[in-house]
Image (cartoon, rainbow, N blue to C red):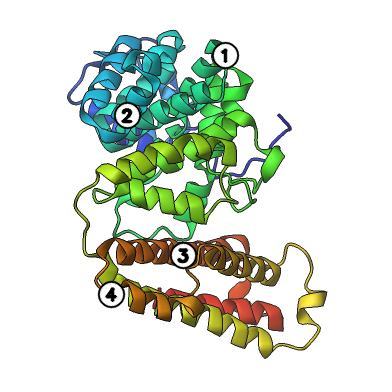
């Protein structure tokens, strides 16, 4: 792994959000300092043997600690390997996705076996216990993602040792989220500004925490760092592409998406995910997708009830058509040599290439707005067909939103409109912000 330039948004220091979650948990579960806790300039804040609870929060948050606090704590009933195995078995018995994966492998025991050799130092057990008690949705997501990642690792022919490394990386991949404001997970909360910087940095934060324990293989660190990358280079934090993403990183990035769909959607998750994977075939590793798609198709065949999603299709098609047409209009108004002179890595090149790639993907899927009027007429009365059109539309609109978000994140100076090309991107982003 090459050295990674780290931002100030990503480190192993205890954030106020993590300290709040930990001390609140300690009001309900016995947490004791098994060593004295010092500030970075040598002031003793907490005596050895002292009980930790929420009354200590204000004192702790006012200082930078010499070391992460969870190196010095003992916790009642912490997360351990037997607990993880029991929770994993419950998921297989109660949740659709883990059950589907276990059935495909022939047993739940095979899916959970890599967890048996999981290293779990006390500091890491503390973090997982905070996650379990204070962020249960995040904890369950991590467990479900672990089952997906292990399934993909087994289907890829990885050794038992490498499957265990994948399991560790998947379980720990979102540790950085513990240090973020919990409001980011509220569907009604829009993550912008500093909050978005922290969101983009959370894979780096998690990687640093894993490295800090010195208990996991280097490959686990790298995979965690890469779990939001994409094969076409559109991911973060390093915008890696193709072969630059490690095999375990590819497993985690796909497992993250698969788990997220089953958590986000109660209606037709298999059909939605199948469409997204096919529509975005350049973003995801094709060999791994080939292990998932047959399972999804079997699940789609078992899904009996369709929600009236087709009602959304005409409006979605109209929005997509407007987005592409407005970008074409803005480009046409630029000086003739703008595109040719635009430097690599600039906002104009990014927006233009992403919008063209999205249009190409829609054309390949037979779902471009130019082709949809006749299709909608043919699908009247076909609930399944209309639902599929609507699902493709939702994913395409989400991708437009991701282009908007990435443009704001990578080029914060865009609103200055310093060049005609920047002005075109800023105008399109303003339209998208108002409309999408």
Q: Earlier in the sequence, mark 2 or mark 1?
A: 2
Q: Residue at x 55, y 68 (%)?
A: 363
Residue 259 visible in the current orientation: no
The span from disc 4 to disc 2 (Cα, nearest Å) is 36 Å
Residue position for label 4: 380
Q: Secondary structure at mark 2?
A: helix
Q: Earlier in the sequence, mark 4 or mark 1?
A: 1
Residue position for label 1: 159
- On the image, the x and y values in percent for residue 45 come to 38, 23
Horizontally, residue 350 falls left or right of residue 387, namely right
Q: Is the C terminus in the top left, top right, bottom left or bottom right quadrant?
A: bottom left
Residue position for label 2: 98
Quadrant of res 204:
top right
Q: Nearer the viewer, residue 236 or 63?
A: 236
Horizontally, residue 255 falls left or right of residue 235, namely left
Q: Secondary structure at mark 1?
A: loop
Q: Earlier in the sequence, mark 4 or mark 3?
A: 4
Residue 155 visible in the current orientation: yes
Q: Residues within 10 Å of mark 1 (few under 14, many from 20)?
A: few
Q: Earlier in the sequence, mark 4 or mark 2?
A: 2
Q: Nearer the viewer, residue 247 or 124?
A: 247
The mark found on residue 396 in the picture is: 3
- On the image, the x and y values in percent for residue 40 come to 52, 27
Q: Residue at x 40, y 12 (%)?
A: 113
């Amino acid at each position: 792994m090459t050295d990674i330039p780290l931002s100030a948004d990503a480190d192993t220091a205890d954030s106020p959000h993590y300290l709040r979650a930990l001390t609140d948990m300690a009001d309900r579960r016995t947490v004791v300092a098994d060593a004295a806790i010092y500030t970075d300039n040598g002031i003793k804040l907490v005596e050895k043997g002292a009980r930790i609870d929420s009354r200590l929060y204000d004192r702790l948050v006012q200082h930078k600690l010499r070391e992460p606090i969870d190196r010095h704590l003992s916790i009642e009933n912490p997360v351990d390997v037997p607990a993880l195995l029991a929770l994993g078995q419950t998921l297989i018995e109660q949740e659709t996705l883990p059950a589907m994966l276990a059935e495909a492998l022939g047993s739940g025991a095979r899916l959970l076996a890599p967890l048996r050799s999981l290293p779990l130092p006390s500091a890491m057990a503390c973090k997982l216990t905070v996650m379990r008690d204070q962020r249960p949705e995040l904890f369950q997501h991590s467990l479900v993602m672990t089952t997906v990642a292990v399934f993909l690792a087994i289907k890829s022919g990885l050794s038992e040792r490498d499957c265990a490394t994948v399991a560790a990386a998947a379980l720990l991949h979102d540790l950085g989220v513990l240090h973020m404001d919990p409001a980011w997970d509220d569907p009604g909360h829009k993550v912008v500004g500093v909050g978005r910087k922290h969101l983009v940095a959370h894979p780096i934060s998690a990687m640093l925490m894993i490295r800090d324990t010195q208990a996991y293989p280097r490959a686990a660190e790298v995979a965690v760092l890469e779990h939001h990358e994409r094969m076409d280079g559109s991911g973060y934090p390093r915008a890696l592409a193709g072969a630059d993403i490690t095999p375990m990183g590819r497993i985690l990035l796909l497992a993250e998406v698969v788990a997220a769909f089953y958590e986000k959607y109660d209606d037709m998750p298999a059909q939605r995910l199948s469409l997204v994977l096919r529509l975005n075939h350049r973003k995801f590793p094709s060999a791994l997708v080939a292990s998932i798609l047959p399972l999804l198709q079997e699940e789609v065949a078992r899904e009996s009830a369709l929600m009236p999603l087709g009602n959304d299709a005409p409006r979605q098609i109209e929005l997509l058509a407007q987005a592409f047409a407005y970008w074409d209009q803005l480009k046409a108004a630029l000086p003739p040599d703008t595109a040719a002179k635009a430097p690599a890595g600039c906002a104009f090149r990014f927006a233009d290439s992403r919008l063209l790639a999205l249009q190409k993907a829609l054309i390949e899927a037979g779902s471009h707005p130019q082709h949809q009027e006749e299709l909608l007429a043919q699908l009247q009365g076909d609930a399944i067909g209309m639902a599929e059109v609507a699902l493709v539309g939702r994913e395409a609109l989400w991708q437009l939103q991701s282009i908007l978000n990435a443009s704001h994140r990578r080029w914060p100076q865009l609103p200055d409109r310093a060049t005609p090309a920047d002005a075109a991107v800023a105008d399109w982003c303003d339209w998208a912000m108002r409309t999408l």
